[in-house]
Amino acid sequence: MTNKRQPPEGGREESLSTESSEDGGGPSRRDFLKGSAAVGAVALGVGAGAIGAASAGIPTPRLHRDGNLIKDPDGNTVTLRGVNIADPKRINVTSQARGKDAVQVIDMLTDASNGWYPRMIRVPVQPVDIGEYEPGSGPPVPAFDQTQLESYLTNHLDEVVQRCAERGVYCVIDYHRHRDVQWAEGQDGPVNTALQDEVDMFWDTVAPRYAEDTHVLYEVYNEPTEPGMWGDPTTTQWVADVWQLWLEMAQPWVDTIRSHADNLILMGSPSWTQSPEGALVEEFDGEDIAYTYHIYPGHNSSQNQNWEDASNNGEGVAGVYEQAPLFVTEFGWEENGGQYIGGTDEFGDAFLDFLEKSPAIHWTAWIADPVWRPVMFDRPFADNANDSVGDPYNGTVPEACSDLPCEWSLTTGSGHMGDDVKNALEQYRNDGIPGEGTATGTPTPTDTDTDTPTDTDTPTDTDTPTDTDTDTPTDTDTPTDTPAADALVVDDYDGDPGWSSHRNDLGEWCGAGSFENGGGETSNGALVLEYDNGGWFQEQINQSVTDYSTLVFSVSGANGGEESEILFDMGGVRTMLANVTDDSIETSTSDVTVDLDSAGVDRSSSSISVRLNFWQGGSSTLEIDEIRLE
């Protein structure tokens, strides 16, 4: 989940599904989907509650890591596939609007009579819900106390964990933090010790509680955000250094869990868990540790349909699954979903095929819910079945379902993921099951790094599909210089398109985050970014710019001289802005130009972007009137 998109809560949201009578493990996935399309009318509804329905359960013995594979106690290779649900407390306290409580959701998703065959269900446990903060907010650190955590576990998580065991499905307990908090002050540290203490307290309580539950896996931290790994750590030293800092931050959590429990551990990575290839540099210390990966259609790697190349903004996996198990615990798509989650079956088909290239890759689609996005269901019982189900902690929740449970409908068709995910789960229902070991593993590799391209072109930020920034007017100067007639305007911040739409004048993605004023604010035709040793900004161009020689920022700064505080990142060049321009940012609007050839920018890349990083220790306000190429 994920500042990544902007629905109400920590998720992304919406989709539908059909049933298929195909037997698992036989035809290719594409053949299977073609076959299932022919019977698409079989079952769009998923039943009101599936209470007492036949479970699609499998044995759930304790799993362990063997090289790059996950195996059961008998040595059979296990490959787990499944879905995410919403935070169980959030489901429960909004059940009258959602139409089900958390246990009823588990029952529905494991109902074999309706064609459901997940082998793993990921359960996001959100600090915002433990501490009862406003949905969509990034709670303070610490977000809760011991009493609140115990109450959450007793009243909401315990029953979900137990129900997963009863239904024969593995349960991933995911500590689901991601919004509005950095895990370290900057690329050189120090780490956020307050956050470190919060997460340690969580696992010191949770790890022993479910230590004897063999079906439970622990995902330690959903999405560490900034400082990010915007490149390939196997070829770029500063990226490898960020990974080393992450090891310093998160190793104590691993140690805490291991002091209590032997459950399989899943570890995320900086950059919203898009850089699992950090494990190729150095793995966490401990036994039975796997790594996680989150990706959505709007990311560069997805647009290129290349999820291997980590040089592309650090978004590829660099074949890390050849060394360690890889759990893709978030992916999904929803046509016209906006920002990162907006996508179609063109992404979905290709990515589901990628997920099946190795038995070392496991997955849970985001998300089996009708509210968090991208949704796999809708709510036909609701008069206004949009994403809003109220604020259960500070407001009211609308009543759309007075007699639980109410029916959810699976989303289907091009641009909706529900049917694709459900069909894939049914197709592979007999593949890689504990005690069966039907998946054929790859040989256990020796510890060797994976070679990947060296330059990290076009860093794109991955805020993973959750928070949407609100534009607030602020006074700004108007540029005085007139651009050349043949200039390529990247963004002029005139409100068309609006900054909050995350589209620039080229129709490409743009965004910002971690500023004092959130994701930036537009006013009087300028973008205002207030920074205090923090913030990222990006404009995607996504086309060759070989016909242009100069990048122009029409910009002003509150103090002047801000070019010495801003890191410039474009076309394989990552350095201080002052190093690539002879101009200075003035207190009134003027042009700051970058000679692209002299700076060494690769102008031929079809996925080029402009990225600015503000974690260099400075504090000021920047007003950008226009970015263009001449």
Image (cartoon, rainbow, N blue to C red):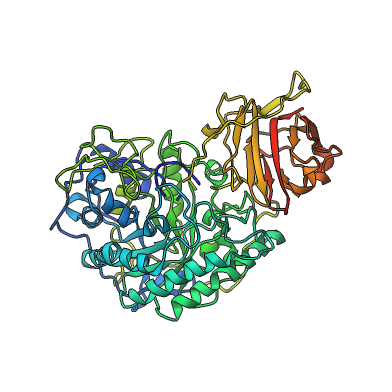
Q: Is residue 6 left or right of residue 171?
A: right
Q: Residue furthest right?
A: 582
Position in image of residue 340 (x %, y %)? 49, 42
Residue 556 location in percent, x, y?
Answer: 75, 34
Q: Nearer the viewer, residue 125 or 280?
A: 125
Q: Residue furthest top?
A: 485
- Whether residue 405 is visible: yes
x and y percentages locating residue 596 in the rendered image: 79, 38
Foreground pick, 245 / 624: 624
Q: In this view, does 99 lie above or below 594?
A: below
Relative image position of residue 426 (x, y in whole percent): 28, 53
Identify the image quadrant of residue 260: bottom left
Camera-nearest residue between 329 and 437: 329
Screen quadrant of the C terminus: top right
Numbered disc total: 0
Considering every residue shown, the one lying at the far front of the view is: 394
At 41% from the left edge and 70% from the top edge, which residue is drawn? 70
Q: Name the residue rendered at 64%, 33% in the picture.
A: 527
Which residue is depicted at the point 31% across and 65% down?
151
Taking the image as shown, residue 630 lies to the left or right of residue 356, namely right
Q: Can residue 427 be seen in this view?
A: no
State whether residue 381 is above or below residue 110. above
